[in-house]
Amino acid sequence: MSSPSVQNVLNRHNPLAEGNLSRVAQIDRSLRSPVVFFTVMSALWLVIGSIFGVISAIKLHVPEFLNTEALTFGRSRTLHLNMVAYGWSFNAIFAVSIWLMHRLARTELRNGWVPILGGIGWNLTLVYGMFAIAGGQMTGVEWLEMPREVAPVLGVCFLLIGLWSVVAFSRRQTTHVYVSQWYILAAMFWLPILYLVAQMMILWFPARGTVQAITNWWFGHNAIGLFLTPVGVASMYYFIPKVLGRPIHSYYLSVVGFWTFALFYNWAGIHHLLGGPVPVWLQSAGIVASVMMVIPVLVTAINFHYTTTSSQAWGAIWGSPTLRFTVFGAMNYTLSSFAGSLMALRDVNAVTHFTNFTIGHAHHGMHAFLTMALFGAFYFILPRLAQREWPSAALIHLHFWLCAIGTIGYVVVMSIHGWMQGMQWNAAVMTPAQIAAAAEPWNYARTICGSLMTLGHIVFCAHVLWMLAPRAEKRQGPTLFAR
Amino acid sequence: MSPAPVESFWDLSLLGVFLLGLVFLGSAIWALSWSRRSGQFDDLERDSRAIFDADEPEGVIQDRFPQ
């Protein structure tokens, strides 16, 4: 019998050696490079994009602020949207979906350099796109403002990244497909089709007349609804029961929720064009679909509510960074979705359309729901990849309160002011100049709330970079890191 | 009178989008059918526990604030 090699002897005393790691830790280790890469990229884009959001907000009450051609309101606001959408949300979703799919499939990631290559291409292309927007080379089509030549490159990069969720699914070591896997797989399947059709019909071979607008809002709404939202919901369906250590209240309802979500969401975007020169039957179809979205949202709300309702659960939620953010996101998913269904009703839309109410609603969905849910996911994932604890509980508390107060304040301010704006415009008693002047205190409040969120994002980004800096001692396994 | 070239192109494009929509619908029906055939709906009570394993078992809270 041969004597043990030097390497084996060393491994026996090294908790991070391959043979000493649990199955889950091996999977996490294979995912470390791409997931950390996308996480860092997303955090950096979030900070830069948020700063552009604050710049845009300040310009509404101090128009001469940073008065350069590259930072006019039209460009800084567009930079904000594109940076937080394609920079923050997409990178964050790549990170969370790759991690979730491999964890749920109980399989390791192989050839991790491929999604990293796609990620490098994705982020470099975004940098080019942002400079083009700042230079005035934007298309003018909301959600597709970057020059059309970026589309093929982004498409190839997306395939290099998104493919790994499909590969993980095809190599799964489990028989059951958990509901989170359904949401993520569907999102990875839906987005390329949405992007392809929108690019072709709006930028490469433009359709005529209102078909462009219809396609625009079909894409814009579905980019949120059929890509960002499903991964956010998938994350909540995984982390809430996982961290609590108890299965979801009604798994049956979660399956119903997925299939009704898939059936109704894709028609809803047309509610952005209510009252416009669009066939009325099409508008009505959009309204019906928007109202039918109550079914999957209600199902999700019931599930999360009953899973988290018990005296022990509330203590666990408040004591867990992951759950504090995720449950906050889940509650706001319900509220923003119900608000969206109401806003699609003709009578309500007649007031809220073209007002700050819509902008408040967009931030309700994109920040109070999605961003907070993604923060929650990162608080669970990163310690397990980096094999070390978050450096500071105080920074997590600070991050939560800055973002929570900022985002709820923003939604409340914009909703109240948006409703007032709509009533003022519809009454036709005040002049447009008077209506704009009446908005000034609300615009200050908007800047304050946006600044709070931005400060929260800076705290998060700094905390991530601090955690990943090679300083703390490494620990073994994907464990509960609380001491 | 034959339609103008641009109109013909758009007729063709819209047909393409319509066919893409059919593929989309067909794939959703196939996925639903596959789910049923592969037993995804057979025991939902058991499958709701698919996220737990020996490393991160049911009944154990998995995350807390650092000290």
Image (tube, coloured by chain):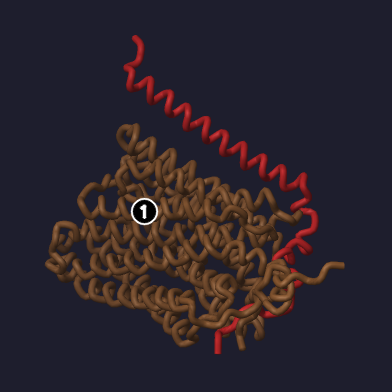
Chain colours: A brown, B red
Residue shown at 40% from the left, 41% from the top? A152
* Residue A94 appears left or right of A270: right
**Residue placed most toward the observer, A26 or A267:** A26
Residue A386 x %, y %: 55, 73
Residue A442 x %, y %: 25, 73
Residue A290 x %, y %: 48, 53
- The extreme right residue here reads A1
Q: Is residue A189 above or below residue A477?
A: above
Pick the quarter of the image with the C terminus of chain A: bottom right
Residue A18 x %, y %: 69, 68
Q: Is residue B53 visible?
A: yes
Kind of residue sitting beneath label 1:
Leu
* Residue A436 appears left or right of B51: left
Instruction: Tell me the chain of label 1.
Output: A
Residue shown at 23% from the left, 47% from the top? A137
**Residue placed most toward the observer, A82 or A333:** A82
Q: Which residue is mark 1?
A: A124
**Residue placed most toward the observer, A480 or A242:** A480
Residue shown at 35% from the left, 11% from the top? B2
* Residue A1 appears left or right of A364: right
Pick the quarter of the image with the N terminus of chain A: bottom right
Q: How many marks?
A: 1
Tell me the quarter of the picture where residue B45 sits: bottom right
**Residue placed most toward the observer, A416 or A321:** A321
